[in-house]
Image: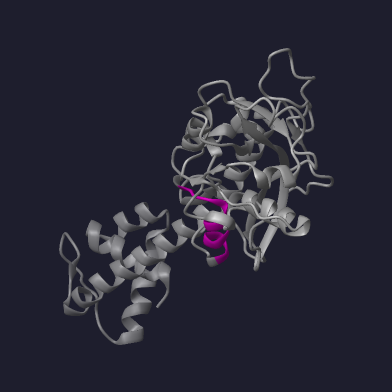
């Protein structure tokens, strides 16, 4: 029994005649009759009582009806699901964003995508890069943007842009010149992402440098949000380090100034996806928009700011840099 035979059977049962079923199915009436006849001959049972003004189901037809409905509905759902993977007319895009996504204008990503593709459902998860990478590796998310380094077993990693990490303090002496890892180890620090601690990608880079320099970096205070850390810095509790995107957003209060590290330190924002796994068309489009927005907020890929103006609390002259040979999807 074929799917077309079941569709013809359902049309005839619903409409009450082979002629009406033929019109609905865009077929010739003899073809409809022949498809029903083949089912009846195969099983040796009539499906309809013929001869009246309207077709009436027999006992065999009544038995087949709910099963045919389930089979056709399942086939239609399978068709919709597969089509949603290769089109932007439906389906769901699941994507992860780095914790401080709003400072890269990525909060607008959902609104922009929805305006372009209103029929696609979105599942956007905003976590620390550690958990975004783990969720992509497990298949919970199709892809995501993270700050490197992360554990990349089973992942394809595409670096997109670098954003410099800056040291933040209200102490003029602390930001009089670029900060060394030795100087950092001697300062009272207020660090954020307390839940993830030294698993956080930026902290991992600091920890690696401290290990090589044979010094120890211990925070005085740990909080969860970068905004809270900067508020404590402004209050004179201690110093911290943040990406240039956060520094330039001016989310802090008070006379905080920022200075680069003596050995430049960068947050590398990267796309992660599972190796050898096809992504839905919706997620591919979401990635395209995210990359475009990252370039826009940086003033264009590879564009550098001019020297800091007098009184500018954000020292240094570069906003974005782009890794060499960034591959396309």
Image x and y of residue 149, in percent = 67, 55
Question: How many dots with numbers?
Answer: 0
- Scheme by which the image is coloured: one colour
Name the foreground residue: 280 vs 327.
327
Image x and y of residue 277, in percent = 62, 64
Name the foreground residue: 206 vs 170.
170
Q: Residue furthest top?
A: 310
The segment highlighted magenta reads: 124-137
Q: Is residue 311 left or right of residue 68?
A: right
Image x and y of residue 257, in percent = 64, 25
- Does residue 164 appear anywhere in the picture? yes
- Does residue 329 appear anywhere in the picture? no
Q: Quadrant of the N terminus?
A: bottom left
Name the foreground residue: 177 vs 195.
177
| Whether residue 19 is situated above or below residue 75 in the rendered picture | above
Give the residue drawn at x 64%, y 58%. 150
Q: Most prominent secondary structure in the magenta stretch?
A: helix
Q: Is residue 276 left or right of residue 120?
A: right
Residue 152 lies in the magenta-colored region: no
Give the residue drawn at x 77%, y 55%. 213
Q: Is residue 212 left or right of residue 67?
A: right
Q: Quadrant of residue 310?
A: top right
Image x and y of residue 114, in percent = 47, 36
Q: Residue furthest right?
A: 324
| Whether residue 221 is situated above or below residue 56 in the rendered picture | above
Residue 126 lies in the magenta-colored region: yes
Give the residue drawn at x 53%, y 34%. 102
Q: Quadrant of residue 291?
A: top right
């Amino acid at each position: 029994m074929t799917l077309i035979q079941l569709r013809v059977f359902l049309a005839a049962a619903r409409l009450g005649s082979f002629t009406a079923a033929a019109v609905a199915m865009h077929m010739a009436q003899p073809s409809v009759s022949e498809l029903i006849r083949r089912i009846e001959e195969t099983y040796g049972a009539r499906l309809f009582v013929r001869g009246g003004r309207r077709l009436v189901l027999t006992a065999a037809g009544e038995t087949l009806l709910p099963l045919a409905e389930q089979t056709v509905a399942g086939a239609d759902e399978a068709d919709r699901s597969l089509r949603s993977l290769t089109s932007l007319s439906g389906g769901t895009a699941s994507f992860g964003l780095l914790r401080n996504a709003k400072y890269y204008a990525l909060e607008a990503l959902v609104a922009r995508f929805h305006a372009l593709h209103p029929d696609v459902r979105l599942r956007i998860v905003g976590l620390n890069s550690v958990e975004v990478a783990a969720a992509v590796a497990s298949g919970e998310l199709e892809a995501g943007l993270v700050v490197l380094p992360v554990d990349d077993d089973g992942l394809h990693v595409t670096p997109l842009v670098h954003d410099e990490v800056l040291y933040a303090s209200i102490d003029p002496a602390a930001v009089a010149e670029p900060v060394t890892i030795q100087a950092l180890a001697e300062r009272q620090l207020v660090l954020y992402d307390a839940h993830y601690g030294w698993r956080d990608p930026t902290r991992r880079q600091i920890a690696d440098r401290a290990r090589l320099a044979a010094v120890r970096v211990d925070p005085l205070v740990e909080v969860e949000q970068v905004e809270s850390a900067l508020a404590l810095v402004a209050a004179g509790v201690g110093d911290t380090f943040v990406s240039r995107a956060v520094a330039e957003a001016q989310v802090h209060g008070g006379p905080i100034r920022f200075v680069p590290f003596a050995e430049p330190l960068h947050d590398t924002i990267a796309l992660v996806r599972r190796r050898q796994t096809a992504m839905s068309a919706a997620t591919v489009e979401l990635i395209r928009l995210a990359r475009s927005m990252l370039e826009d907020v940086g003033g264009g890929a590879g564009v550098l700011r001019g020297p800091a103006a007098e009184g500018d609390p954000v020292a240094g002259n570069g906003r974005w840099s782009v890794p060499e040979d960034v591959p396309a999807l």
